[in-house]
Amino acid sequence: MTAMRSRVGALRAALGACLSLAFASGCSLSPGAGPALPAADRSDDSRIASPADSENLLYIADRVTHTVYVRALPKGNQIGTISGLLEPEGECSDAKGNVFVTDEQMGIISEYAHGGTNPIAYLIDKYRPVACSLDPTTGDLAVANLTSGGLKARGILTVYPNARGRPNYLFRKGMSFNYCGYDRYGNLYIDGYDTGNAFGFLELRKGTRTFTPVSLDTKIAAPGGVQWDGAHVAVGDGAGHAIYRFKIDGYHGTQVGATLLAQTKTVGTLWIQGNTAFVGEVVKSYEGEVNFYRYPAGGKPYVMLVGFAYPSGITVSRSGQSSATAP
């Protein structure tokens, strides 16, 4: 473990030096520093397959196999993989179809164009990035970082303006951060554990740097995925089989509906796209699955994908929206 941490530290130092140059310079990392990372290239044309350009794609990060699996929707057929990561943890995507993958151990966020297998950009996080979300009003990328809980609980949020460059760091004492999600207005919602290891929920209102506690009227056992579903803030129960929908008003959140999932026991890894909720979980040691549920109806999954070790992140890249040449 010590040797691995030394390699990761060396890799992050090399990456930091590399990213101080323009990406156009073709800077790459020494393989001896750690897992090989290709040079970021905004003209990347390493697409998985030509049909991918016209298909919505499901990206599934597996932290144990160090791989991101790319599946074609609606059936979930595998069409490619992304490798070279140490511990891919969380994922999110923007309106252009670009996909962001956090790597907790390497302390980076890699960006991929729709269907691309090589990164078009890297972002450095000096902490341990786990979950992410993009502000639809500004293009800012918010990243929740893993920290210790209990009496020393502290939340760390990294925000990259327009998903580029040097980030801003925001801190919150008394609560660790697990998942985060923006609504359509640019308000960010975060869940995690408080100092008593109980579920906590916060709002970072648009244009502010202060976290506001929000009291939900429904008991949630453990933090789970947080996402705007198009009408309400959806929160998964990380120790239950439900996705709850809330209307947030000031310091209070009122449940307006619940989606009960018959095949799932924990709703941590979650992505909602239209009328489908994609949920990943570890069924037993090193055996994970990703299930497709009708949303918000719930019930039994209509597609079940198996063969994963630990599906830790899910997102959907929409077809026809990719822009590898965006500034």
Image (tube, helix red, strand yellow):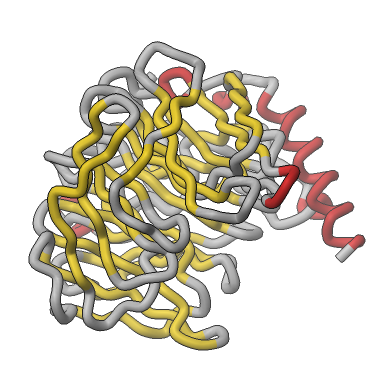
Quarter-of-image position of residue 269: bottom left
For residue 316, above or below residue 186: below
For residue 314, above or below residue 263: above
Q: Is residue 101 visible?
A: no
Q: Is residue 78 visible?
A: yes
Q: Position of residue 44 (x, y in %)?
A: 42, 40
For residue 207, above or below residue 68: above
Q: Is residue 176 left or right of residue 276?
A: right
Q: Judge by depth and name the residue closer to the eye, 120 or 189.
A: 189
Residue at 37%, 62% in the rendered image: 237
Q: Position of residue 166 (x, y in %)?
A: 60, 19
Q: Judge by depth and name the residue closer to the eye, 243 or 77.
A: 243
Q: Is residue 25 left or right of residue 257?
A: right
Q: Judge by depth and name the residue closer to the eye, 52 or 256.
A: 256
Q: Position of residue 48 (x, y in %)?
A: 34, 59
Residue at 56%, 20% in the rendered image: 165
- Point out the image quarter for the C terminus: top left
Q: Is residue 30 left or right of residue 269?
A: right
Residue at 79%, 51% in the rendered image: 8
Q: Is residue 246 left or right of residue 196?
A: left
For residue 53, above or below residue 291: above
Q: Position of residue 141 (x, y in %)?
A: 44, 30
